[in-house]
Image (cartoon, rainbow, N blue to C red):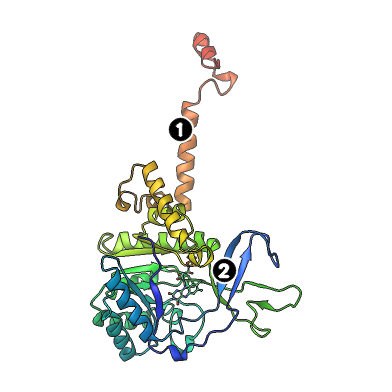
Amino acid sequence: MTYEPVDWVSLDAEKVKNVTPRYARLRVDGNGSAKGQIIGWQNIELISDRPLEIMLKEFKQLKEEYPDRILIASIMEEYNKAGWEELIDRVEQTGVDALEINFSCPHGMPERRMGAAVGQDCALLEEVCGWINAKATVPVWAKMTPNITDITQPARVALSSGCEGVAAINTIMSVMGINLTTLRPEPCVEGYSTPGGYSAKAVHPIALAKVMNIAKLMKSEFGDTDYSLSGIGGVESGGDAAEFILLGANTVQVCTGVMMHGYGVVKKLCSELKDFMKQHNFSSIEDFRGASLEYFTTHTDLVTRQQEAIKQRKAIRKGLQSDKDWTGDGFVKETESMVSN
Ligand SMILES: Cc1cc2nc3c(=O)[nH]c(=O)nc-3n(C[C@H](O)[C@H](O)[C@H](O)COP(=O)(O)O)c2cc1C
């Protein structure tokens, strides 16, 4: 239920040139502090520069060693139909169970129309989803970018174009900070930087809002049970995962949490999630998936509900509101209604 799709693959790893340092952290204690809990993480990493052949070999080995486990390959390619078809074909031959398509990386290679360059352009997205779904024989998830005003628009396009599900969110475009001694931005590479992708705890509330919006769209326009939704962003605990599920996610992914704390985070997360389920007597994810969705409404509706609640509270309030309310003969009962013990 909880995982990060294995490896970020594209056909031509040769074109991927990463830099170091490529990460920067935000701590609660603020700029320049080496102390305090890490709440935000920025990366300027491109997709993996490991050769495709090695990835494919590893996928195959993983499926051979763990045939009963689900393996999902996260893939990204240029705006090139033949390239996508070749990549899908080669990845599928390893026996993966599903594909997650990266339409969402916010940095790097937009000139090659990769990642968010596709996810932010619904016409392009529809075309590329069409190529992918015509070729793929395993389920396809489209991974959405939060760097867009209304995330339900690309989600709708992806689901209408044959994708079995959507995953959200990828990282949020960010500038992590400026070193106040050198006046250079972070992460600093030879004195310069470039905006990157923000992740970890600090993005969790933003991810919850995006997932909530997509879940509502899926519920109202697509069969809620025919399509799936994967929640990503700032998950470190079972409670974080439960929140995504309560908002309609079928699965939850962890990335930065594992990078910072190691694989142990996943075991802890699963046991905390089980405790949460026990506390509420839930025996399956479906018992609580989407249970909190119905409590989101419009602000206007909140005002109406509050006015109604105040009216009801006033109606049942004990005692007289003012001395002009004494009725005369009824004073014994009226006095009684204002005694506290
Ligand atoms: C160092 C790093 C590299 C990433 N590379 C990719 C990538 O190649 N493809 C992709 O779809 N998402 C990539 N992501 C995004 C994560 O999968 C995830 O969507 C995002 O970080 C939010 O989740 P988190 O807060 O659990 O990290 C990357 C994230 C990090 C931190």
Residue in the image at 33% along x and 83% along y: 128
Residue furthest toward the right? Answer: 181
Residue furthest toward the front? Answer: 65
Quadrant in which residue 20 is drawn: bottom right
Answer yes or no: is residue 140 visible. no
| Residue 259 higher or lower than 288, as above or below | below
The one of 20 and 194 positioned closer to us in this rendering:
20
Instruction: State left or right for residue 31 relative to residue 51.
Output: right
What's under tag 1, amino acid-wise? Gln
Q: Earlier in the sequence, mark 2 or mark 1?
A: 2
Residue 318, given in percent of the width and then of the height, sits at 51, 22
Task: Tell me: is circle 2 under 8 Å from ligand 1.
Answer: yes
Residue in the image at 50% along x and 30% along y: 314
- Say which quadrant the C terminus sits in: top right
Q: Secondary structure at mark 2?
A: strand
| Residue 287 higher or lower than 331, as above or below | below
| Residue designated by label 1 | 312
Residue in the image at 26% along x and 62% along y: 223
Residue 263, given in percent of the width and then of the height, sits at 46, 63
Proximity of marks 2 and 1: CB atoms separated by less than 8 Å: no
The one of 51 and 141 positioned closer to us in this rendering:
51
Residue 67, given in percent of the width and then of the height, sits at 26, 68
Answer yes or no: is residue 88 visible. yes
Instruction: State left or right for residue 187 relative to residue 269.
Output: right
| Residue 6 higher or lower than 321, as above or below | below
| Residue designated by label 2 | 41
- Say which quadrant the N terminus sits in: bottom left
What's under tag 2, amino acid-wise? Trp
